[in-house]
Image: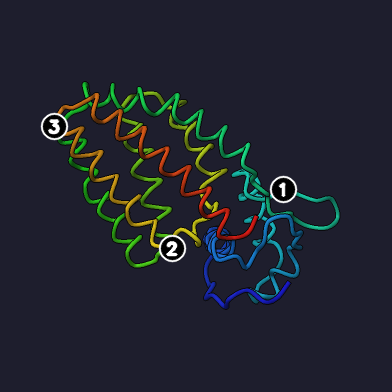
Amino acid sequence: MGHLTQRDLNASRERLRDQVAHALRAALISGELRPGVVYSAPTLAEDFGISATPVREAMLDLAREGLVEPVRNKGFRVTEVDERDLDQYTEIRALIEIPTVGRITRIAAREDLEALRPVAEDIVRAAREHDLIGYLEADRLFHLTLLGLAGNERLVETVGDLRKRSRLYGLTALDESGDLVPSAEEHLELLDLMLAGDAKGAEKCMTRHLGHVRSLWAKGDRATGK
């Protein structure tokens, strides 16, 4: 499979499991772990210089996120995401997130919205610094915290699951093309519209943002030659 980039992993078993999962996500983003390829926990553990148990546990965490799938007696296959999947994920997110953003604009306290500004700025900063893991974490925190202001936990869980299944797609290609920064800056635009009480404008921005994300996925797909 080729050795993964060496990473410092040294902690308790629970913490080590989280560190391994984090490192595996980074390997997925960088392309070190490739879609459709099966990887065994013992082989990955050799690359990390640790036992297979925390690697296997971390891979099970990724399987629950839809990023890999178990292959009996072999290991885990990196999940492939096709155009139909991405279209369906985007459609469901649009049905949920666009009207919810409008409703939140009307009901949310100003201080709750303003508290998201540092997170939106972190998204932009991570995009400019090519910190893809940081970008993903800040982007996830922004969107799910924002949706949480609607007071519906199941809604947040549903969107969180959809994001997990598509969040790694084409990210490296988007970063290399320079398209990630404009997408990141849309979070600040959305927040400003919501703080201004412009529910319709916020809905339009969210519509554009999701469409932008989907078009960027398609561009990333062409860049990787899939």
Q: Is residue 194 above or below residue 128?
A: above
Q: Nearer the viewer, mark 2 or mark 1?
A: 2
**Image quarter of residue 32:** bottom right
Q: Which element carries disc 2, helix, strand or loop?
A: helix
Q: Which element carries disc 1, helix, strand or loop?
A: strand
Count the marks.
3
Q: Residue at x 53, y 37 (%)?
A: 162
- Dots 3 and 1: beta carbons under 8 Å? no
Q: Is residue 217 above or below residue 197?
A: below
Q: Which residue is mark 1?
A: 69
Q: Residue at x 35, y 24 (%)?
A: 100
Q: Please tell me which of labels 3 and 1 falls first in the chain.
A: 1
Q: Amino acid at mark 3?
A: Ala
Q: Please tell me which of labels 2 and 1 falls first in the chain.
A: 1
For the C terminus, the image quarter is bottom right
* Gap between marks 3 and 2 measured at Cα: 32 Å
Q: Residues within 10 Å of mark 1 (few under 14, many from 20)?
A: many
Which mark is on residue 196?
A: 3
Residue 158 in view: yes
Query: Considering depth in this image, is 60 or 167 the residue closer to the camera?
Result: 167
Q: Nearer the viewer, mark 3 or mark 1?
A: 3
Q: Which residue is mark 2?
A: 177
For the N terminus, the image quarter is bottom right
